[in-house]
């Protein structure tokens, strides 16, 4: 055994300090992303428009004076003009895409009295009439517009916004940045700290090698796209957090022999929440149940089912409140008039507009060939392995672990990771053309982000082999560095194309 594996208690404490330092640094980076959240692509244009306002006001003042208007009327008119010009000049907002604005619209509709639609509490008809509150991620049924996202997550956010709105007078209309900071810290930043801690505890159980522990935590902090999404309200980040916590709780139950009822209930709640954020994680929910059946006394498993049932009930209930059915909006994307919720016409400030999904453009049209789609999902411009080559270690780790690990629970978990990953990725590759969009304009294949904590678990067997040699450690660090570069490329906004996509597009090799 390599000398690095022989660590005493003091050595383990030092490794924990090193992991903690990396997690604290990552927390600072993520907090900086949240505080800096802004539509920087329109910053210069907005600044130019605002700088022109004094000159335009002076021109208007001179015109009014020439007409003999009284000074009092001139000042009132100039105040009105200044307000209108500033409103027209405003382009920046802390909501970075139609995807997250769709959820924010629901939050406003649920909390703000002026934004409510009588008889349809989740309808966003009034919200989208507000300037800069447009979104294409919406559906229409029963004469009203709704976010296309499942409503449970927005309902949870609305609970916090209700406190900010009624308790502190902070409105999304007047204080969008302040509200966004609080919500993103609550629903993204704090859960990510739990995510880091869960992965650190998980890898600590799997190996005593300090280099491997530091490598995994460092990669979790800086070398994946998950932290890139911390400044936008999305379902992928909490979905990954739930997967990480579920894996750590499963390790406590199966490997450490803990049998407290509340651990099973908590695991059920967390894993069911993960399903509400990422529907394909239902496969992981089922496989974890089978693993628990294999290693745990059966009666206590009822708490896993009870915890899950409570969350699933909330998911279906909020969907019923919003849409009058338990099926989420994206289940209504086909059929004739009235059945396809994505095929509609709506009105904004007197202008009739067709739904974007009647005639999507660019990458949203969907890849025609499933084979081309599979290539780019895996190793192409949105490739899981081309953008984050770190996951090549997971491929090797699962292979070596299934062949060499002797503890049945560890091999079973590795097998579950392989099964879940294959089913999830195949599910998205085999979708109809309209759904083969790589996740739209986004910095990665975002639908696989929730698998990240599972893939960290799967890479440990490979790292145990590579850590014993200088060349092996160098290879692992190179893959991590390349992955960190991809994750850092979308500096301000995760809703941008990956560097590889932009490079291929500029070279004329792809066109959507």
Image (cartoon, rainbow, N blue to C red):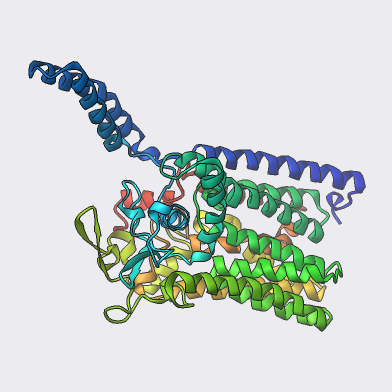
Q: Nearer the viewer, residue 24 or 83?
A: 83
**Residue closest to the eye, 5 or 94:** 94
Q: Is residue 389 above or below residue 343?
A: above
Looking at the image, is 229 positioned above or below residue 282? above
Picture residue at 44% right of the left edge, 43% below the top:
94
Number of on-image labels: 0
State whether residue 420 appears in this view.
no
The residue nearer to you, when weighing 447 against 482, is 447
Tell me the quadrant of the picture where the C terminus can be found: bottom left
Any part of residue 164 in sight: yes
Task: Examine the rendered structure and indicate whether residue 417 appears above or below residue 393.
Answer: below
Q: Residue at x 16, y 22 (%)?
A: 60
Q: Position of residue 26 (x, y in %)?
A: 64, 42
Q: Position of residue 283 (x, y in %)?
A: 60, 76
| Lateral position of residue 178 relative to residue 42, left or right | right
Q: Position of residue 120 (x, y in %)?
A: 40, 66
Between residue 464 and residue 469, name the one nearer to us: 464
Q: Could you tell me residue 263's position as x and y percent?
A: 78, 67
Residue 4 as seen in the image, left or right of residue 112 = right
Is 81 rendered above or below residue 342? above
- Name the quadrant of the N terminus: bottom right
Residue shown at 35% from the left, 50% from the top: 133
In the image, 332: left or right of 293? Answer: left
């Amino acid at each position: 055994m390599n000398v690095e594996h022989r660590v005493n208690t003091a050595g383990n404490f030092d490794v924990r300090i090193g992991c903690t330092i990396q997690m604290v640094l990552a927390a600072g980076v993520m907090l900086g992303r949240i505080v800096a959240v802004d539509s920087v692509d329109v910053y210069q244009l907005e600044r130019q428009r605002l700088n022109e306002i004094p000159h335009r006001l002076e021109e208007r003042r001179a015109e009014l004076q020439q007409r003999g208007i009284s000074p009092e009327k001139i000042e009132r008119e100039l105040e009105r003009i200044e307000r209108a010009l500033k409103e027209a000049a405003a382009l920046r907002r802390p909501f970075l895409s139609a995807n997250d604005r769709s959820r924010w619209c629901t939050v406003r509709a649920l909390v703000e009295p002026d934004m409510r639609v009588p008889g349809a509490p989740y309808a966003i008809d009034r919200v989208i009439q507000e300037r800069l509150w447009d979104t294409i991620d919406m559906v229409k049924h029963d004469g009203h517009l709704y976010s296309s996202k499942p409503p449970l997550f927005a309902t949870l956010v609305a609970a916090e916004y209700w406190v900010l709105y009624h308790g502190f007078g902070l409105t999304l209309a007047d204080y969008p940045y302040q509200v966004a900071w609080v919500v993103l810290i609550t629903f993204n930043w704090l859960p990510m700290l739990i995510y880091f801690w869960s992965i650190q505890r998980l890898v600590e159980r799997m190996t005593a090698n300090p280099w491997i522990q530091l490598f995994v935590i460092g990669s979790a902090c800086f070398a994946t796209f998950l932290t890139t999404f911390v400044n936008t309200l999305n379902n992928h980040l909490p979905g990954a957090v739930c997967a990480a916590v579920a894996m750590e709780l499963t390790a406590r139950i199966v490997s450490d022999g803990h049998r407290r009822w509340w651990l099973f209930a908590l695991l059920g709640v967390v894993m069911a929440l993960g399903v509400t954020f990422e529907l394909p994680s239902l496969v992981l929910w089922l496989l974890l149940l089978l693993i628990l059946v294999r290693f745990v006394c059966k009666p206590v498993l009822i708490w896993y089912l009870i915890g899950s049932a409570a969350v699933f009930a909330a998911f279906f209930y909020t969907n019923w409140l919003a849409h009058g059915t338990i099926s989420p909006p994206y289940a209504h994307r086909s059929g004739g008039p009235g059945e396809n919720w994505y095929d509609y016409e709506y009105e904004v400030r007197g202008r009739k507009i067709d739904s974007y999904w009647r005639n999507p453009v660019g990458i949203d049209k969907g890849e025609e060939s499933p084979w081309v789609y599979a290539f780019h999902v895996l190793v192409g411009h949105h490739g899981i392995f081309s953008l984050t080559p770190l996951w090549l270690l997971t491929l090797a780790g699962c292979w070596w672990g299934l062949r060499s690990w002797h503890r049945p629970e560890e091999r079973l978990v590795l097998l579950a990771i392989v099964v879940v990953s294959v089913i999830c990725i195949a599910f998205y590759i085999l979708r109809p053309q309209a759904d083969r969009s790589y996740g739209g304009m986004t910095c990665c294949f975002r639908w696989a982000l929730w698998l990240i904590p599972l893939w960290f678990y799967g890479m440990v067997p490979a790292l145990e082999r590579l850590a014993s040699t200088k060349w092996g450690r160098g290879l692992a660090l190179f893959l991590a560095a390349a992955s960190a570069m991809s994750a850092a490329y979308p500096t301000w906004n995760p809703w941008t194309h990956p560097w590889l996509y932009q490079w291929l597009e500029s070279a004329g090799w792809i066109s959507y």
